[in-house]
Image: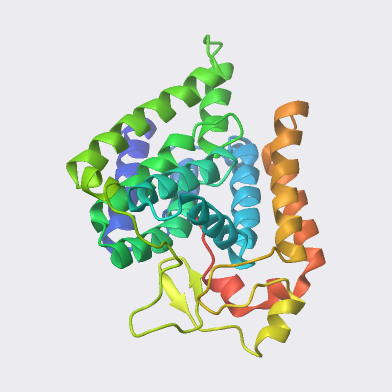
C-alpha cells in the first residue's frame, strides 16, 4: 500500500476517532504525521518538521490566546451588552446582533469554533428569555462566524489566500471574503424567515442581559458552562481588570478591557496596513495584555476553561 493511500486512510481514522472518542484531533494528527512520515513515507524527523506549517500554527496560537483574554476579562461581554443596548426593545433584531457579533469576531481574527463558543451561550440565554427558537439562534451564530471567517486577516482567509498565492493562481482576497459573507448572510436570512423571525419583528420588549433561572446570581460565562464567581470578590476582580459579575449589563470599560479593545484595533490596523503576520502581532498584543494583568493568567478558569480550538 502506497504512502499516499496510508495517509488518506489515517486522516479518515483521525476524524472517526476524534468524533467517536472525543479525543483532541490536533494531538491525533501530530501522532499520525510522525508515524506515517517515519514508517510509511520514509521521512526523517527533520523532513517532517520541514513541512510543518509553522506560520499557520503561530496564527492559531496568537489569535486564540488573544481572544481567550478578551473573553476572560469581560471585553466580549461588554461588546455584546453594547450591541444589545443599540437594539432597544426590538426582539427580532437579537438574532442578527448575535450573527453580527460572531461575524466581527471571526473577521478580526478569532477562529470560528472559539467565536461560536464565546457567543453561543450568550445567544441561547437571550433565546430562552425572549422565546426565540433556540435552533434559529444557534444557526444564526454559526453562520455569523462563517460569514466573517474568510477576511484577509482571519485564520481561514490567511490559509486560503496563501495556498492560492503559492499555486500562482489568480485571486482576490476581497472576493473570497465577500463570497463567504454574502452566502452565509443569505442562508441566515432564509433560516430567520423559516424559524419564526418575521413574528419576532413584530415584538417590542425591554431587552436586558438574560438572567439564569431562579433569579439573578453572580456567574461568569466560560464556553458553554456557567462558572462560579471570582474568589475573593470584587477586589480581586478589580486587580485583574475584571468587571463585577452581578448579572447586570457591564457599564464602563475597565482599564484592561479598554487596553484589550485598543490591542485588537492595533492588530487589525498593523496587519492590514503594514502587511505584518497576524499571528505574531496577536501574540505581541496578548503578551502586553498578560503583563498588564498577570493575575488574570493565574486564575484556574484561565488555564482550563477558556475557548480553544487545539
Count of numbered marks: 0
Q: Quadrant of residue 239?
A: bottom right
Q: Is residue 71 visible?
A: yes
Q: Residue at x 33, y 80 (%)?
A: 213
Q: On the rendered structure, is 230 left or right of 181?
A: right
Q: Residue furthest bottom?
A: 232
Q: On the rendered structure, is 257 left or right of 1?
A: right
Q: Residue at x 41, y 75 (%)?
A: 211
Q: Residue at x 66, y 49 (%)?
A: 62
Q: Residue at x 75, y 64 (%)?
A: 256
Q: Nearer the viewer, residue 174 or 161?
A: 174
Q: Nearer the viewer, residue 175 or 81?
A: 81
Q: Is residue 280 visible?
A: no
From the top left corner, tell me how far across and down residue 232 is, in percent: 66, 90
Q: Is residue 224 above or below residue 54?
A: below
| Quadrant housing the N terminus | top left
From the top left corner, tell me how far across and down residue 166 is, in percent: 58, 18
Q: Is residue 193 above or below residue 226?
A: above
Q: On the rendered structure, is 203 left or right of 46?
A: left
Amino acid at each position: 500500500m502506497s504512502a499516499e493511500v496510508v495517509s488518506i486512510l489515517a486522516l479518515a481514522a483521525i476524524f472517526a476517532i476524534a468524533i467517536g472518542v472525543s479525543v483532541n484531533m490536533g494531538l491525533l494528527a501530530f501522532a499520525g504525521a510522525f508515524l506515517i512520515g517515519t514508517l510509511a513515507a520514509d521521512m526523517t524527523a527533520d523532513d517532517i518538521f520541514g513541512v510543518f506549517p509553522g506560520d499557520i500554527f503561530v496564527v492559531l496560537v496568537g489569535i486564540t490566546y488573544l481572544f481567550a483574554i478578551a473573553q476572560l476579562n469581560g471585553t466580549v461581554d461588554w461588546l455584546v451588552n453594547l450591541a444589545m443596548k443599540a437594539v432597544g426593545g426590538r426582539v427580532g433584531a437579537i438574532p442578527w446582533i448575535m450573527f453580527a457579533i460572531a461575524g466581527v469576531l471571526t473577521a478580526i481574527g478569532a477562529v470560528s469554533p472559539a467565536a461560536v463558543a464565546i457567543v453561543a451561550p450568550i445567544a441561547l440565554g437571550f433565546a430562552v428569555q425572549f422565546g426565540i427558537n433556540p435552533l434559529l439562534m444557534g444557526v444564526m451564530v454559526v453562520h455569523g462566524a462563517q460569514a466573517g471567517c474568510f477576511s484577509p486577516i482571519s485564520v481561514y482567509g490567511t490559509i486560503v489566500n496563501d495556498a492560492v498565492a503559492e499555486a500562482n493562481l489568480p485571486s482576490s482576497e476581497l472576493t473570497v471574503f465577500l463570497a463567504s459573507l454574502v452566502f452565509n448572510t443569505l442562508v441566515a436570512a432564509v433560516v430567520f424567515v423559516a424559524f419564526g423571525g418575521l413574528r419576532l419583528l413584530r415584538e417590542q420588549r425591554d431587552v436586558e442581559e438574560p438572567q439564569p433561572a431562579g433569579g439573578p446570581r453572580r456567574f461568569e460565562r466560560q464556553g458553554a458552562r456557567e462558572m462560579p464567581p471570582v474568589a475573593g470578590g470584587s477586589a480581586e476582580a478589580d486587580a485583574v481588570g475584571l468587571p463585577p459579575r452581578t448579572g447586570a449589563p457591564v457599564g464602563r470599560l475597565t482599564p484592561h478591557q479598554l487596553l484589550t479593545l485598543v490591542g485588537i484595533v492595533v492588530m487589525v490596523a498593523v496587519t492590514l496596513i503594514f502587511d505584518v503576520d497576524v499571528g505574531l502581532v496577536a501574540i505581541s498584543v496578548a503578551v502586553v495584555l498578560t503583563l498588564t494583568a498577570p493575575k488574570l493568567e493565574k486564575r484556574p478558569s484561565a488555564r482550563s476553561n477558556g475557548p480553544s480550538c487545539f
